[in-house]
Amino acid sequence: MQKSIILVLLAFSLVGTSFVGANITTKQPNVILTPQTKTGVQFINDTGREVHIYIGSSRTLIGKNGVTYVSCADCAAGKKVFRQRNDIIQKGSLMLVLDASMCGKKIKLSQYL
């Protein structure tokens, strides 16, 4: 008796999964998936140490081998990028001024520090 109950339950579980599988295999229209890319300027910290920079009035810490992004809107606005002055949390010397031509580019910080 127990074997027949187990067989019946097993049969029902197999039938139930076949219906679920039938619903999953619906045909979808052809969709081309493209990877999401961040637009703007990409700052790459290749200096081997943590770097604090100021973009406009915002202070940003970029860790060792870290990356941060600045939007194209900030580039078009002509935001200025400063490095941190020594260990003091103040703006140091001007590194560069962002412009629209930089949108989509990668900038290595070692070129400006």
Image (cartoon, rainbow, N blue to C red):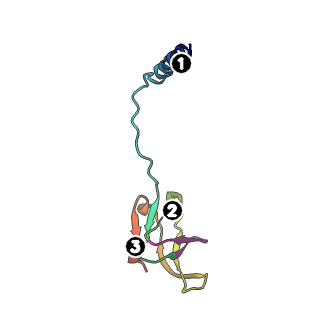
Disc nearer the start of the sequence (3/1): 1
Q: Which residue is mark 2?
A: 70
| Quarter-of-image position of residue 106 | bottom left
From the image, state whether disc 1 or disc 2 is nearer to you.
1
Marks 1 & 2, CB-CB < 8 Å contact: no
Q: Which residue bears the numbered disc 3?
A: 46
Residue highlighted by disc 1: 6
Number of labelled discs? Answer: 3
Give the farthest residue toward the front. 1
The stretch of residues the image draws in magenta is 52-64
Look at the picture and state if 2 lies above or below 53: above
Q: Residue at x 53, y 58 (%)?
A: 73
Residue 98 on image: x %, y %: 48, 68
Helix, strand or loop for the magenta stretch, by majority? strand
Looking at this view, is 93 or 45 the one in front?
A: 45
Res. 93 mark: none
Task: Give the crowd class for mark 3: few <14, some 14-19, many >=20 residues within 10 Å.
Answer: some
Q: Residue at x 58, y 70 (%)?
A: 56
Q: Amino acid at mark 1?
A: Ile
Which of the image's four quarters has the N terminus? Answer: top right
